[in-house]
Amino acid sequence: MKKLILAIMLTVCTSAFAVSADSVRGSTGFVERGNSYGKMIDVLGNPDSSYKHIIHDRDGWPHKAITYSYSLNNVRYEITVVDGAVYSVNWER
């Protein structure tokens, strides 16, 4: 019984975390990893919010990044842009 409750709790908790995605569908097309910042704005429009931060590559080198938040169809997307290109796309319900 404890294992069943634990499994249910883990299932519920995992749906609250952000999940990595390959692309986001906008009204005029898709935004994928590697697309330019300009294409992201053309397809998705202006973001709801953004924040600047630093990310590190595999070698430990820092890179300036900006994460933009969008709310599309009751789903929250966070798109991280590094050096003018889409680095990652995450979503959460």
Image: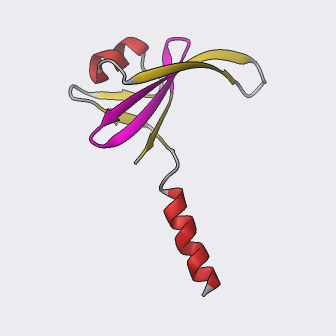
Please state the horizontal and vertical placement of residue 81, each as a whole percent of the image. Answer: 51, 20
Instruction: Give me the residue at 58% from left, 18% from top.
Output: 65
Colouring scheme applied when the structure was drawn? secondary structure
Against 17, is 81 above or below? above
Instruction: Give me the residue at 42% from left, 20% from top.
Output: 35
| Residue 71 is one of the magenta-drawn residues | yes
* Front in this rendered view, residue 74 or 89: 74
Against 80, is 12 above or below? below
The number of discs equals 0
Please state the horizontal and vertical placement of residue 61, each as a whole percent of the image. Answer: 76, 18
Against 5, is 12 above or below? above
Q: What residue occupies the far bottom of the structure in this picture?
A: 1
Report whether 81 appears left or right of 72: right
Question: Which residues are the magenta region?
Answer: 67-87
Task: Please identify the dominant SS of the magenta region.
Answer: strand
Instruction: Give me the residue at 51% from left, 45% from top.
Output: 18
Report whether 31 appears left or right of 19: left
Instruction: Give me the residue at 66% from left, 16% from top.
Output: 63
Against 84, is 78 above or below? below
Q: Which quarter of the rendered picture does the N terminus lie within?
A: bottom right
Please state the horizontal and vertical placement of residue 7, each as a whole percent of the image. Answer: 57, 74
**Residue 45: quadrant of the picture:** top left
Please state the horizontal and vertical placement of residue 32, each as a whole percent of the image. Answer: 41, 29
Q: What residue occupies the far left of the structure in this picture?
A: 27
* Front in this rendered view, residue 93 or 24: 93
| Residue 27 is one of the magenta-drawn residues | no
Report whether 79 appears left or right of 3: left
